[in-house]
Image (cartoon, rainbow, N blue to C red):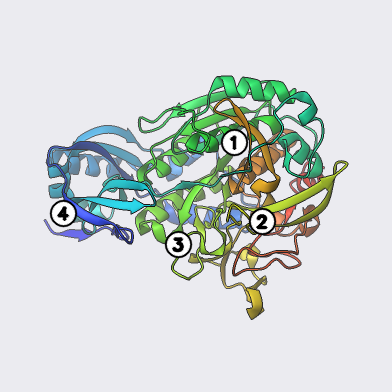
Amino acid sequence: MKSHPVKGSNHPAPVGAHCVGSCDPGERFEVVLVLRRQDPDTFRDLVDRIAAGDPSAQPVSRDEYDARFGASAGDVERVTRFANANGLTVVRTEPAERRIVLSGTVEQYNAAFGVDLQRFEHQVGQVRHRFRQPSGPVHLPDDVHEVVTAVLGLDNRAKAQPHFRIGATGRPPLAAPALARASAHAFTPLQLATLYDFPPGDGGGQCIALIELGGGYSDADLSAYFGALGVGMPTVEAVPVDGANNAPTGDPNGPDGEVTLDVEIAGALAPAARIAVYFAPNSEAGFVDAVSAALHDRTRTPSVVSISWGAPESAWSQQTLSALNDALQTAVALGVTVCVASGDSGSADGVGDGADHVDFPASSPYALGCGGTRISANNGQIVRETVWDGGADGGATGGGVSATFPLPAWQRGLAIVRGANGSGALVRRGVPDVAADADPATGYLVRVGGEDTVVGGTSAVAPLWAALIARVNAARGKPAGFVNAVLYRQPLAFNDITSGNNGDFSAAPGWDACTGLGTPVGNKVAAALGTA
């Protein structure tokens, strides 16, 4: 039977990586096949109308989504037959998530998908990364080629990076006197909620999903932190995905710093919300599966998702970028808000090729991209707020123009300021949408690995916005869902940031590619979303 390449399934190795040989033919691992959805035209129409702010278009329930837009029984059967014919074991079939998980060996995958799996090494600084990936595109035979939209897991390279930065040492410990007032150098989440005029509330009845690709949190850190804040201990639950789980290492400079930062910010600002932490392997398959698991979780039913991990658009295979973007469209259809950090490496996003890049999934038009600022305050009031544009740590808020996604309807008519070259029309998806404090020099007081420290990065902004949305959802009595179209019509709901740059892009009145619309005036955001 004739086979065809799966669109976008090429996995180019990163610059500097070299092949060290073929994979062990007997090595066994799992892959995920993503299937097409039923009634795709109706689905796209629904998502487009919701995303454009059409009030007559309403999200669907998970039950309705499963029945209308999950994988069909016929498609599941066709892929199952393909797996059996190639000696691959069907581990799980998840029609609602449109996923079939297979187990097999390198030899079996090479034969089934027409690939040659190779081992690579890549030196980054002092760390040597080893990973597996196919030498060319994935191929599928006629009878399943039109059914399967992505084959994930053949490539196991860790691509996503956590977007946090440790601040300077020597900050005051998290004792009550240190938490009683804001300083010029660090803030608690509660102090930032006051500065940003958050509406009252504790997120009761809501679930905030946190997507994590490594590391973990310790109950001792959380207990000490929330106790020092004087906030009730929130319900925090680790949710395993693809065999990963809460696995703290005790190193605040590693992924633990990301995980704990997310939990402590979201939990401090929405202490009555359920904090569900979805742990997955740091791979393309793990990232997509974690987001999908959160969206389709019928037990916890998150109303808002916070993602503080990402990578430049250019780092992803096209099929994975499409699969994750498709999952974010599912969030729109289900009425789930997804807040995503825009990155910490300025307009280049750390690529180093002299060009501008934006971080994905923040660049998805179905995400609320979250950029960063530097903030100064006195007596509970913001004195000055500028773009987080670097400093001793070398970081800066991510932002710019997508090379992948077209201009969304709610960004039409906007301009972009590119340094000394002046302004021009925004012609593709601009990032970010919103912002908040992210500079580690004016960062967040947190407790990680038994130590009190100051952390910044746009990683802090995503859970802050997620907690604000959770408060809004609790007050509304129903999820706000996709909020971008509404927020772009409410410029007075933001503190407009007009000073600073992130490299090639400069702040300006109104939306800009550094801080988006600006930082929240929380009560006005709540009013705009319908809780006045």
Nearest to the eye among marks 2 and 4: give it. 2
Mark 4, other Cα within 10 Å: few <14 / some 14–19 / many ≥20 = some
Contact between marks 2 and 4 (CB within 8 A): the answer is no
Mark 1, other Cα within 10 Å: few <14 / some 14–19 / many ≥20 = many
Q: CA distance from mark 1 to mark 4?
A: 43 Å
Mark seen at residue 20: none
Residue 112 x/y as whole percent: 15, 48
Q: Is residue 303 above or below residue 385?
A: above
Q: In the rendered image, is residue 63 in sight?
A: no
Image quarter in which the N terminus is found = bottom left
Q: Is residue 429 above or below residue 335?
A: below
Q: Quadrant of residue 114?
A: bottom left
User: Which numbered disc flags the more N-terminal residue, 2 or 1?
Assistant: 1
User: Which numbered disc flags the more N-terminal residue, 4 or 3?
Assistant: 4
Disc 1: which residue: 261
Q: Nearer the viewer, residue 268 or 295?
A: 268
Residue 175 x/y as whole percent: 73, 25
> What type is the residue that disc 2 sits on?
Trp
Disc 3: which residue: 351
Residue 182 x/y as whole percent: 80, 38
Disc 2: which residue: 388
